[in-house]
Each structure stands twice: as C-alpha cells, then as structure tokens.
Amino acid sequence: MERDSALQIIQSQLPEKRYIHTVGVLETAVLLAEKYKVEREKIELAAIFHDYAKYRPIAEMKLIVSEQKMSDKLLSYGSELLHAPVGAYLVQKEVGIDDEDVLDGIRYHTTGRANMTLLEKIIYISDYIEPNRSFKGVEEVRKLAEKDLDQALITAISNTIQFLVKKRQPVFPDTLAAYNHLILKEEF
C-alpha cells in the first residue's frame, strides 16, 4: 500500500489533532528507520496505522478482544491499551495489511514486550517522542534515540512505569517484560 493511500485511510479514522500526531510519528519513524537501517515501507505503514482503532468505542474494542481470543489481561489494565492489539486486528481485517512485522509494530506500540524487533522499537519510541509531544522527560528520550535506541526505550518505559505508579495504576506485564529484557540485555 502506498503512503498517500494509507494517510487518506487513517485521516478518515482520526480527529485532526490525532492525525497531526500520526504524521509526527510517521516523520519520526522514517528518520529513525534511516538511522537504524529498517525497511522504510514497513515502518511507514506501522507508523501511519498505529492509532487506527484509537477512537473506536470501548465496547467494540472489548468485544473484539473477547471474540478474537486476545489476552484476557488486556481487559484488566484499562481501556487505553486496547486500541493497539485491536488496531492490528482491524488493520488486517479492514485495510488488508497482512505483514506480521507491520501488525506487531501496531500491536505493541503501547505496551512494548520482551525481545522487541527493531521495527517495534522504532514505532514505540516514535509514538513517545514525535515532535508534537511535550512532557517532562521527552527531550532526554529524543536525544537518546539519536544515539542508542535501547537506552531511549529504557528511559521511556521507565518514565511510563513511574507515571503509572504515581497514579496508582497497574503496569501491564508486557511493559515490565520489555523493561526487564532491555535491562538484562544491558548486563551482558
């Protein structure tokens, strides 16, 4: 699928502010893909469609999680996580993208997971640092992403975990697994 066609599809699914965010994720992901030598077309598709299901009704997303036999854990950790795995499913079903690398980039962009692929790391971090994001710690992660993607991920995931802990919200197991995997990998 061509970039312009994909952008037209996603623009019809998102409010303008979220579409602007998506373009920021796309631009950031393309720059990181060039830096880290990842196939541009796959990165573009995963970046463009990462929030495909973001504005679907929560009841619809919960139903898809149940019907498609996705992890029951998804239903216990708040609705904010649902759009990623549901988005991967809907992009395959409605848009016709079958590339598992692209779908996994979409699927894990909110939680991460242990042993993330380079494409998954780039989508995760691009969503976190795209130019329209402005929050404490984002500049540090932007600088790290230019030098060491794993260090950027460790910092971003650590920031996310700390944010959730301060709000007394649960941390999804895949997020902890992603953090632990990266930290343990660092030791060897």
Image: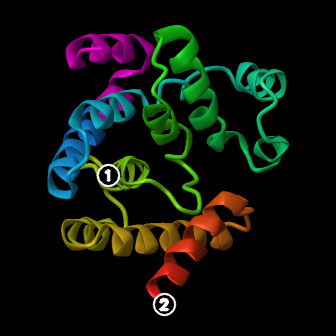
Lateral position of residue 66 relative to residue 106, left or right: right
**Is 92 situated above or below 69?**
above
Q: Which residue is mark 1?
A: 133
Q: Mark 2 sits on what residue?
A: 187
Q: How is the image coloured?
A: rainbow
The amino acid type found where label 1 is placed reads Arg
Residue 52, given in percent of the width and then of the height, sits at 48, 24
* Sequence-earlier tag: 2 or 1: 1
Number of labels in the image equals: 2
Is 27 one of the magenta-colored residues? no
Left/right placement of residue 62 relative to residue 54 reads right
- From which residue to which does the magenta span run? 1-22
Q: Residue at x 25, y 32 (%)?
A: 23
Identify whether 104 is placed above or below 62: below
**Residue placed at 30% from the left, 14% from the top?**
1
Question: Is residue 7 found inside the magenta-colored segment of the image?
Answer: yes
Q: Is residue 163 visible?
A: no
Q: Give the Cα distance between marks 2 and 1.
A: 31 Å
Any part of residue 34 in sight: yes
Snapshot quadrant of residue 165: bottom right
The x, y position of residue 58, in whole percent, is 71, 26
2 and 1 marks in contact (CB < 8 Å) = no
Q: Quadrant of residue 2?
A: top left
Q: Amino acid at mark 2?
A: Glu
Q: Secondary structure at mark 2?
A: loop
- Which quarter of the picture shows residue 72? top right
The spot of residue 90 in percent (x, y) is 58, 18
